[in-house]
Amino acid sequence: MRLEYTERQKQFRAEVREWLAANVPKEPLASFDTQEGFEQHRAWERKLSEQGFSAVTWPKELGGRGCDLIEWLIFEEEYWAAGAPLRVNQNGVFLLAPTLMEYGTPEQKARFLPRMARADDIWAQGWSEPGAGSDMAAIRCKAIRRNGCYVINGQKIWSTRAVWADWLFGLFRSDPESQRHHGLTFLLVPLDAPGITIRPIKQLNGLTGFAEIFFDDVEVPVANRVGDEGAGWAIAMAPPASNAA
Ligand SMILES: Cc1cc2nc3c(=O)[nH]c(=O)nc-3n(C[C@H](O)[C@H](O)[C@H](O)COP(=O)(O)OP(=O)(O)OC[C@H]3O[C@@H](n4cnc5c(N)ncnc54)[C@H](O)[C@@H]3O)c2cc1C
């Protein structure tokens, strides 16, 4: 067996290396746990996306580069060797996107993934709650279906960079009678929706990289549900079956 890179792979590595050498900021960006740094990192993600480099394994029509696994590894090797910035949309690109590729409708993929690739939308995660940390099946934040919407009431906590993020994905209790991992639904929530209050949590270093999120009759259309109602736990726990994200 000959373990060598193909010509195509070598060309890809050379292209990535050259592009990074020309484009990685000479000075480090400000911390993405600050508003200024967050927006600097968003701008960097946009620049990456112009080359299809913000989500290299995604299909080109969704904003990616159509890379296979080896090309992805080549990209990551070159990216970190070049000292390129941390990925401010990692929650979206590396966590939510595989879920959408697997469980999202065609409409959801077309609506959310290209915007994610361009960092038009930066995503936060909404799992933890006071009383539901390590024990995530204790989630109590409710999302009750009414007139084509889920009406969310409750609280999330420890949501990384939710202070500046645009959207949140997470689990909500859609069946108030349910227990544990039953009756949870996976929802996509715009963080500027009426009824949302985001309270920054100051870290020991003084930065506000985390936030509490309070939901007061927040209406989210049923179209923002990923998978079936009540099937959220299995969706959140499923490892991405494809390497398309
Ligand atoms: C860097 C970072 C980023 C995060 N980002 C997000 C985010 O974006 N969104 C989000 O939703 N959450 C986020 N979290 C929260 C995280 O996912 C966990 O929910 C949280 O750290 C654990 O919950 P807790 O703090 O309530 O601790 P608890 O669950 O209350 O645990 C406290 C302590 O008790 C121990 N413990 C708990 N249960 C048991 C048990 N049964 N037996 C023995 N020991 C136990 C734990 O090990 C821990 O030491 C983040 C956490 C970190 C550290």
Image: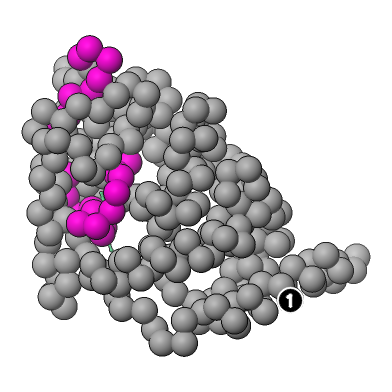
What segment carries the magenta color?
146-169
Name which residue lies at 31% across and 27% down.
Answer: 185
Q: Note whether 14 is above or below 122 in the view shown.
A: below
Q: Nearer the viewer, residue 53 or 4?
A: 53
Quarter of the view holding residue 205: bottom left
Is the stretch drawn in magenta largely helix, strand or loop?
strand
Which residue, given by chain and number where applicable, does mark 1 sit on? 14
Q: How many marks?
A: 1
Left or right: where does residue 91 sit relative to residue 71?
A: left
Q: Nearer the viewer, residue 132 or 172?
A: 172
Left or right: where does residue 189 sit relative to residue 197?
A: right
Residue 140 visible to an observer of this rendering: no
Residue 79 visible to an observer of this rendering: yes
Q: Quadrant of the N terminus?
A: bottom right
Picture quarter with ligand 1: bottom left
Residue 36 in percent (x, y) is at: 26, 71
Magenta run includes residue 70: no
Q: Nearer the viewer, residue 121 or 228?
A: 121
